[in-house]
């Protein structure tokens, strides 16, 4: 054995190279390691399926991935599943959610399907519907474990979030429940509440409790349900007054941006009782116009990770630049930081998704129009993803797909929320990276592509391949 002294130089060199290797690994370039197109079942509602508004979830190892899709402009929904790490997917139409036949096919549509994966590998989903039933515009939600019974909460409901429990034997659903508005031009409620209940795989709905009741005249929108440290349940939603929203949803009139206020509430007893938390940022819903293309931009997304909850928020464009901001809570939603802009790009940015990564980092994805040329009659938009270090604010980003012209996809229904365009995405944290699902919309008769991408924050293994031994 060599002496320590005789080896000191080689040890020093080894330490230096090890440190350099560690730095290289920590600064490994963000890259798209794998992509797969999600299938859409053929023949849905008598035609070729298009797709939009996807969500994605995965097991901790990243081997099983589930994504929910909206099909045929809201006529049906499906669940795509991969059991090989996202290399390939199979998709099935969700039972009970189709509005392809009968009166509902003429007046109804599904919105915001959301999928979630339980620890036992069971896929859960929730979806909302709305339609004109006997002259009355109504809403509802459905929650189920794939292949099992369906739970349908009573009353007028919308925007359901689903969170499987840690034992895998049930899930918790969170939805908005509201009074109807007598004015059929807006279909906006005069009062909303956040309600929650447990759901068993057979569709049995447990006792319904109120998670949040902000009072008359206040609207709740886009709820999220998360599990924080110590099994604390955290619900987050956007609030605005009824008066703020009425003009915004009329495509014939321009309006001032709606500045929502994010609110949170928490439960430490499994959802039986809830305590109001802090204000979680201020997302916007604003009209954006460029080269004759009009749309509403907005969106917020919430994610939980060890020690923190984060919200990614669309900010109003200013001085010719758009942005995505972040606010976070370190105390299970009791208090939230002031939002700060992490993504700042030319023109506009919107519809963010977010996940918490190790080491004080977050993963973000969004759409922006940084490559659009003013005056060419187009609005070119592209999906992006990034890893951001929260301490320094530095980020590394990559495009997720090609740019596309948003103009031909716009219709008079643009003022609903923008997700009707098929421009949507989601992401989930994975070992050494994260997974995203995004749409690449196409105007009819083309079919919208929905793409799953696995992004790696780990350095590539550049070692030469081992040669086979000849015997």
Image: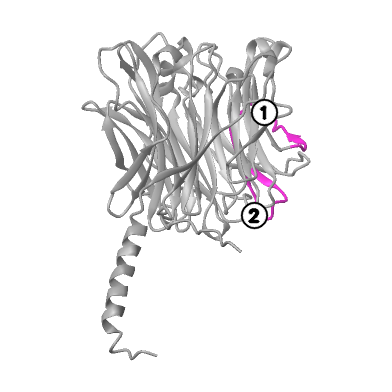
For the residue pair 58 and 206, the one nearer the viewer reads as 58
Judged from the image, the secondary structure of the residue bearing numbered disc 2 is loop
36 vs 381: above or below: below
Instruction: Locate residue 165 relative to residue 212 in the image: left or right.
Output: right
Circle 1 packing at 10 Å, graded few (<14), some (14-19), many (20+), is few
* Quadrant containing the C terminus in the rendered view: bottom right
User: Magenta stretch containing residue 152, yes or no?
Assistant: yes
Q: Percent x, y for residue 245?
A: 43, 22
Judged from the image, the secondary structure of the residue bearing numbered disc 1 is loop
> Splitting the image into 4 quarters, where does residue 206 fall?
top right
Rendered image coloring scheme: one colour
For the residue pair 180 and 351, the one nearer the viewer reads as 351
Tell me, for residue 155, which label it has, or none. Answer: 1
Q: Which residue is mark 2?
A: 166
Q: Residue at x 34, y 40 (%)?
A: 325
CA gap, disc 2 and disc 1 = 28 Å
């Amino acid at each position: 054995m060599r002496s320590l002294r005789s080896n000191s130089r080689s040890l020093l060199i080894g330490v230096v190279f090890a440190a350099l290797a560690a730095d290289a690994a920590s600064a490994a370039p963000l890259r798209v390691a794998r992509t797969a197109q999600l299938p859409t079942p053929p023949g849905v509602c008598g035609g070729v399926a298009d797709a939009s508004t996807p969500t994605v979830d995965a097991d901790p190892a990243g081997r099983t991935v589930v994504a929910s899709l909206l099909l045929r402009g809201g006529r049906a929904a499906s669940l795509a599943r991969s059991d090989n790490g996202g290399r390939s997917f199979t998709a099935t139409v969700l039972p009970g959610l189709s509005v392809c036949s009968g009166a509902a096919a003429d007046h109804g549509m599904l919105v915001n399907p959301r999928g979630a994966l339980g620890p036992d590998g069971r896929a859960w989903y929730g979806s909302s519907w709305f339609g004109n039933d006997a002259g009355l515009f109504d809403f509802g939600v459905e929650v189920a474990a794939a292949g099992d019974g369906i739970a349908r909460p009573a009353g007028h409901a919308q925007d359901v979030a689903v969170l499987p429990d840690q034992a895998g034997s049930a899930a918790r659903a969170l939805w908005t429940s509201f009074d109807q508005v007598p004015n059929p031009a807006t279909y906006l409620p005069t009062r909303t509440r956040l309600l929650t209940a447990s759901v068993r795989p057979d569709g049995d709905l447990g006792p319904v409790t109120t998670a949040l009741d902000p009072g008359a005249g206040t609207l709740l929108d886009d709820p999220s349900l998360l599990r924080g440290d110590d099994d604390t349940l955290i619900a987050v939603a956007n609030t605005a007054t009824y008066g703020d929203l009425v003009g915004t949803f009329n495509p014939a009139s321009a309006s001032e941006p709606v500045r929502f206020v994010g609110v949170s509430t928490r439960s430490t007893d499994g959802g039986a009782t809830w305590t109001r938390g802090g204000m979680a940022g201020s997302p916007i819903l604003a009209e954006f116009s460029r080269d004759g293309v009009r749309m509403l931009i907005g969106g917020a997304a919430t994610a939980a990770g060890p020690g923190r909850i984060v919200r990614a928020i669309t900010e109003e464009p200013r001085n010719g630049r758009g942005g995505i901001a972040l606010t976070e809570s370190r105390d299970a939603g009791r208090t939230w930081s002031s939002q700060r802009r992490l993504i700042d790009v030319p023109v506009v940015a919107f519809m963010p998704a977010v996940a918490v990564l190790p080491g004080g980092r977050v993963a973000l994805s969004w759409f922006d129009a940084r490559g659009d040329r003013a005056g060419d009659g187009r609005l070119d938009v592209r999906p992006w993803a990034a890893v951001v270090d929260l301490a320094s604010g530095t980020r590394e980003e990559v495009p997720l797909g090609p740019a596309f012209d948003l103009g031909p996809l716009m219709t008079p229904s643009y003022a609903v929320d923008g997700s009707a365009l098929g421009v949507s995405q989601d992401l989930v944290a994975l070992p050494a990276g994260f997974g995203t699902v995004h749409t690449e919309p196409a105007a009819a008769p083309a079919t919208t592509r929905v793409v799953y991408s696995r992004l790696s924050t780990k350095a590539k293994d550049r070692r030469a391949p081992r040669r086979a031994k000849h015997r």
